[in-house]
């Protein structure tokens, strides 16, 4: 692409495909057939099916820790419909490839914001014939592999105005000095409550008390830097190392204890 035509040589891959029945391996094989010199790193294929919120959170959490690369993300309930297939160039230099359903937006913002967006229309970069139900294999991974191997970004397709893109799959947090309102982005397999509240925007100070407001109750919780600072089964609020605020229980499920689920609103207050 203009001023940025070097090959990235790395392609990251995130989906809700799971590992039980073959699509991830098939996509790897397609990438290898196009660009065998490009390394593919699997970020996750355990996103809950159709869960755009969880996919967006995991992608945005992971990408700041990768080198500049091409990132393919496929959580795509609207596959085969009028939703656009996109390639997004961000300020850090990365290229994000995936559907226009909000999945890519939080990651793009965490990588400095969007520079340019293109609709993927160049059939020469796709695997043919294109299945209407498997764009990961036939559109997103092939285009990602070509771009990682040095294909110019301009050849992907027509420019799309970034203001026309679908919004993130969550309500943006409302930040103020002494309070913040956000959402539960996901509950991980430990039961930790991963929020969409960014620590950079609302820092967590150690050894403080925060009031957590949920749809069902309010509870005062200590802040900490690690689980071992509190007793077993105690709840804490902390910076979860991904750059988002997390609520956890030491050796227990915070989600279960607090009655929280993905998508629920929550608020924090400094007291």
Image: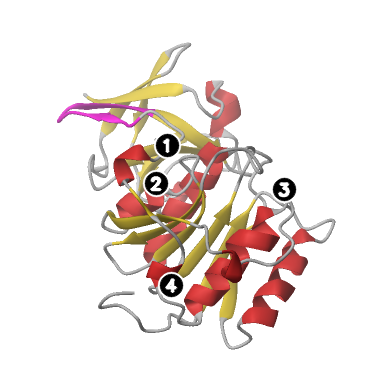
Mark 4 — residue?
Answer: 69
Rendered residue at 83%/56% (across/down): 20
156 vs 255, left or right, is: left
Which mark, residue 132?
3
Q: Which quadrant holds residue 221?
A: top left
Compared to residue 116, the image places residue 51 above or below, namely above
Q: Depth-wise, is mark 2 or mark 1 nearer the camera? A: 1
Where does the magenta region start and end?
172-182
Q: Secondary structure at mark 2?
A: helix
Per the model, the C-alpha gap separating discs 3 and 4 is 27 Å
Q: Are marks 4 and 1 in contact (CB under 8 Å)?
A: no
Mark found first going from the N terminus, 3 or 4:
4
**Disc 2, disc 1: CB below 8 Å?**
yes
* 201 on left or right of 215: left
Q: CA distance from mark 2 to mark 1?
A: 8 Å
The one of 197 and 18 positioned closer to us in this rendering: 18
* Residue that carries the numbered disc 1 in the rendered image: 166
The reply, left or right, for residue 126 in relation to residue 62 is right
- Which residue lies at the image location 46% right of the left edge and 65% below the top edge? 156
**The C terminus, quarter of image:** top left
Residue 181 forms part of the magenta stretch: yes
Residue 214 lies in the magenta stretch: no
Q: Position of residue 201 (x, y in %)?
A: 22, 42
User: Toward which corner of the image does residue 83 lie, by quadrant?
Assistant: top right
Q: Residue furthest bottom?
A: 37
* CA distance for labels 4 and 1: 23 Å
The x, y position of residue 44, in whole percent, is: 61, 58
For marks 2 and 3, the one nearer the N-term is: 2
Q: Residue 113 appears at what percent x and percent y?
A: 27, 53
């Amino acid at each position: 692409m203009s001023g940025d035509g070097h090959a990235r040589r790395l392609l990251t891959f995130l989906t809700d495909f799971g590992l039980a029945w073959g699509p991830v391996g098939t996509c790897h094989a397609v990438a290898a057939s196009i660009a065998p010199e490009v390394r593919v790193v699997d970020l996750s294929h355990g996103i809950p099916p159709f869960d755009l919120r969880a996919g967006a959170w995991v992608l945005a959490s992971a990408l700041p820790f990768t080198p500049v690369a091409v990132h393919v993300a496929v959580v795509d309930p609207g596959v085969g419909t009028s939703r656009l297939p996109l390639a997004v160039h961000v300020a850090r230099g990365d290229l994000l490839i995936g559907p226009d359903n909000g999945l890519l937006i939080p990651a793009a913002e965490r990588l400095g914001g969007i520079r340019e967006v293109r609709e993927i229309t160049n059939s020469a970069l796709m695997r043919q014939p294109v299945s209407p139900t498997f764009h990961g294999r036939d559109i997103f991974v092939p285009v990602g592999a070509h771009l990682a191997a040095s294909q110019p970004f301009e050849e992907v397709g027509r420019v799309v105005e970034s203001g026309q893109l679908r919004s993130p799959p969550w309500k943006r947090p409302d930040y103020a000095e002494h309070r913040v309102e956000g959402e539960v982005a996901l509950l991980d397999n430990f039961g930790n409550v991963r929020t969409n509240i960014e620590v950079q925007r609302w820092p967590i100070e150690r050894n403080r008390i925060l009031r957590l407001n949920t749809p069902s109750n309010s509870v005062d919780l200590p802040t900490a830097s690690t689980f071992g600072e509190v007793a077993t089964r105690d709840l804490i609020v902390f910076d979860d190392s991904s750059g988002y605020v997390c609520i956890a229980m030491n050796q227990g499920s915070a989600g279960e204890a607090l009655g929280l689920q993905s998508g629920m609103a929550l608020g924090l207050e400094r007291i």
